[in-house]
Amino acid sequence: MLGLLRLYDYAEISAETQGVVTRETIQRAFHATEEGFASIVSELWSTMPNLATVGTCCLVGVIYQNTLFVASLGDSRVVLGKKGNCGGLSAIQLSSEHNANNEDIRWELKDLHPDDPQIVVFRHGVWRVKGIIQVSRSIGDMYMKRPEFNREPINQKFRLAEPMKRPLMSATPTILSHPLHPNDSFLIFASDGLWEHLSNEKAVEIVHNHPRAGSAKRLIKAALHEAARKREMRYSDLRKIDKKVRRHFHDDITVIVVFLNHDLISRGHTNSTQDSPLSIRSALEH
């Protein structure tokens, strides 16, 4: 799931720093969001214990002084469409993905848990943290972070066989900064459901060929066509399947496409609805 959300207390944190955006202020916002959710899980533990098993990926983009900051947890992704000098367009990935299927993430987990040979387990065709969950970082998933939430009455499939010595997942985002260039055309923020079926290059090509209105919906439609093709079925038949059952065919897909107006960005123009420095298209497919 793509968590492009109002980070907990971010307005307050921004006020404390007089609106200055840094890696530290973004990280503080993520930490405050995590702690805020943890307090809700604790408060509702007696009546809604399975809230401890709820979590989300989070992908955030902030533009400050002509610099784009991208912060990510989990396996959502942001890709930049950048104009080339000869008129072509290149796809540049601007985020890291925290998924145990990536070898570097498995090594990271092993380094963090040298005394646990089962920190990553290959199960049901993919690598998973403790054989349970693919992502290694998220907001929430308290059952993998705090031992007091990894016990009855949560579902057996979420409970560990041995006591938790330290958090198995993290809410610390990877943060990248990218100085914006006039050739930077648009940004595609999307959950892993899109990237499972479309390459960075294909997604950028689709947006480039069909800019502005409907671009996010076109990306989702292209991903669903590819999901249907992989299952050797027609797109129209895939669409007829009940959405609860369709999770077996493709993951949730959330897409936000942001078009950049560099003239207004460079002037710090952010509060006019008529002349916005950003043009946003979004779509969601369960």
Image (cartoon, rainbow, N blue to C red):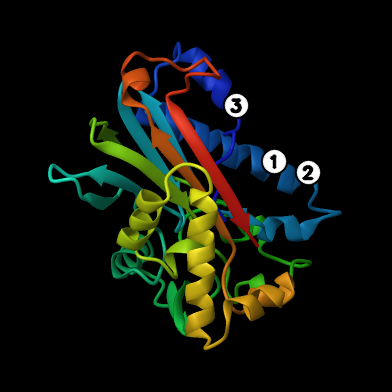
- Disc 3 vs disc 1: Cβ atoms closer than 8 Å? no
Q: Which of the pair 19/274 is nearer the observer?
A: 274
Q: CA distance from mark 1 to mark 2?
A: 6 Å
Q: Which residue is mark 2?
A: 43
Q: Which of the pair 259/86 is nearer the observer?
A: 86
Say few, some or many: other residues with alpha carbon within 10 Å of mark 1 (under 14 / 14 to 19 / 20 or more).
Answer: few
Instruction: Give residue 184's position: percent from left, percent from top.
Output: 27, 37
At 34% from the left edge and 54% from the top edge, which residue is drawn?
Answer: 204
At 46% from the left edge and 40% from the top edge, which residue is drawn?
Answer: 60
Instruction: Give residue 219's position: percent from left, percent from top.
Output: 48, 58
Q: Amino acid at mark 1?
A: Ser
Say few, some or many: other residues with alpha carbon within 10 Å of mark 3 (under 14 / 14 to 19 / 20 or more).
Answer: some
Which element type, helix, strand or loop, lies under badge 2? helix
- Is 67 rendered above or below residue 125? above
Instruction: Please state if 38 lies on the left or on the right of 275 as rendered.
Output: right
Instruction: Give residue 165's position: percent from left, percent from top.
Output: 51, 61
Q: CA distance from mark 3 to mark 1?
A: 14 Å
Q: Which residue is mark 3?
A: 9
